[in-house]
Amino acid sequence: MSDPRHFNPLARLLHWSMAAAIFAMLFIGAGMVISLQHREQLLDLHRPLGIAILLLAIVRLVNRLRNRPPALPADLPRLQVWAATASHWMLYGLMLAMPVIGWAMLSAGGYPIPMFAGVHLPAILPHSPVIYGFLRPLHGVLAYLLFLTILAHLGAALYHAWVRRDGVFGQMAKGGAATK
């Protein structure tokens, strides 16, 4: 099987739709922390969006494992190749872990987990103030790590688009081939 020149259409659709959902989620989460007046409405958005991100991340991971991504440029330094690989797997890990940890946190806190129209998620952990006390700050710390990883990912994408101009950005942005 030859190396693809761009990401498949499903990968591109999931990438950009999840980027929008994750940015929204980060801002909703930040709003929940600073706003008492709108906290309930933001929570009502946060929970189902988190589960949607979890489901999309699973689909995205399956698609990624079944479809080889385009190769990075051959002249890319090994440290940058390692950083790209590590940051992508970190993003996948965080996209999966954040919603599961949020769900587990609410379960351990004994909170109901309403999604929409009377649909509730089942608890995945027993009620435990100790576990809740561990998961709540972990969820916040991982949100900051996700935000920093996204900033690094965005910085690398812009580096490829504006400095190297090596076609890497176009592989995901429009499915284009290398322009170098």
Image (cartoon, helix red, strand yellow):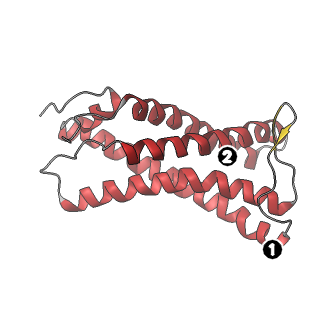
In front: 171, or 43?
A: 171
Query: How packed is label 2: few (under 14 Cα within 10 Å), some, or many (20 or more)?
Result: some
Kindly identify the residue that appears in the image at 34 percent across and 30 percent down.
Answer: 173
Kindly identify the residue that appears in the image at 22 percent across and 47 percent down.
Answer: 72
For residue 81, what is the image quadrant? Answer: bottom left
* Marking on residue 130: 1
Sequence order check, earlier mark of 1 and 2: 2
Q: Percent x, y for residue 57?
A: 53, 44
> Given this view, does label 1 or label 2 mark the residue nearer the observer?
1
Q: What is the secondary structure assignment of the residue under circle 1?
A: helix
Amino acid type, label 2: Ala
In front: 6, or 49?
A: 6
Say which residue label 2 marks. Answer: 30
Q: Percent x, y for residue 15?
A: 45, 36
| Relative horizontal placement of residue 133, taking residue 86 as reference (left or right) | right
Kindly identify the residue that appears in the image at 84 percent across and 61 percent down.
Answer: 109
